Image (spheres, rainbow, N blue to C red):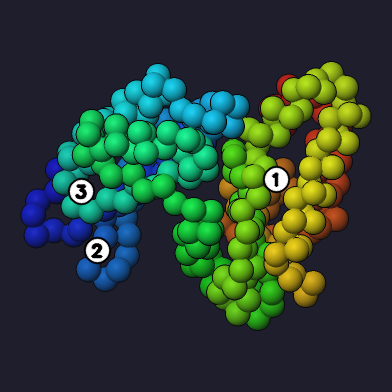
Amino acid sequence: MAAYAAGGPAVLSVIDVGSSGVRMLVAELKPDGSVRVLEDVAKPLTLGRETFRTGTLSAASIQKAVNILRQYRTMMDGYGVTHTRAVATSAVRAALNRDTFVDRVFLATGIEVEVIEGSQETLLTFAAVQRALAARPEFLREDSLMFELGAGATEWALVRGGEVVGSVTYDLGTLRMRDLLRAESGDRRAMTRLIQHNVREMMNAVKRTLPFEKVANLIAIGPEARFAARALKGEGDLAAVSAKDLRALADQILAMTPAEVSSF
């Protein structure tokens, strides 16, 4: 780690307090607008598992978050970070004691965490992928449906003319689904039916909010999307896969055990 002298390029940081971990990116913003990443770190922390089950964050979990953010604060100071933005998503957003979490973090670290709504999260996500979409002009000409499957929720957005024209947050993510599936553990057919039922319910809710009858492209974001792209030999930041191949992959995975999926 190197300290940066005053008068040099601006050094910025962003922190994401998510449902399954806390991530920080430190980057140097050069005068020409280009960005050089200096640090990209992530620490696991399952805030979502607690919030989605009990509705609150325990003192122990809040302290773990504080410990992680203290480490990040030290790194930020080492790089001479001048501006930072820290956001918390569904796990903290759903917690009844989220104000306590925000206050405790600020008093211990000086980091002000902003609890953002699902619509804000969608817009921030889309801003991050716009550069990749610029290389695919068809996404700007045609309607596209973008989604990100998170631990606590799935964010959906209708993209038209290169802009988000509507969005919806549906409270179904990997952690919530895992809890639902636990009751059907060992019965693969029942688990498959449960997944299909919940996905149908989600899509019906999305259809009621977003008019996507003319959608030509589906944009998937996040680790699950990257896993599917790698499995289907997709390449680059915007890997293209066919709906037919994606459906075949889903059928293949549904027939696997958790151990087989983890080594896939």
The foreground one among 261 and 171 is 171
Between the residue at mark 3 and the residue at mark 2, the CA separation in whole angstroms equals 14 Å
Residue 132 — which label? none
For the point 61% across and 68% down, the residue is 166
For label 3, the residue is 81
Query: Quick check: can you spot residue 137?
Result: no
For label 2, the residue is 30
Reply above or below: 214 against 25.
below
Local crowd size for mark 2, using a 10 Å CA cut-off: few (<14), some (14–19), many (≥20):
few
For the point 59% across and 32% down, the residue is 52
Between the residue at mark 1 and the residue at mark 3, the CA separation in whole angstroms equals 36 Å
Is 58 left or right of 133, judged from the image as shown?
left
Task: Determine the image quadrant of residue 178.
Answer: top right
Reply above or below: 52 against 224.
above
For the point 40% across and 19% down, the residue is 60
- Amino acid on which disc 2 is placed: Lys
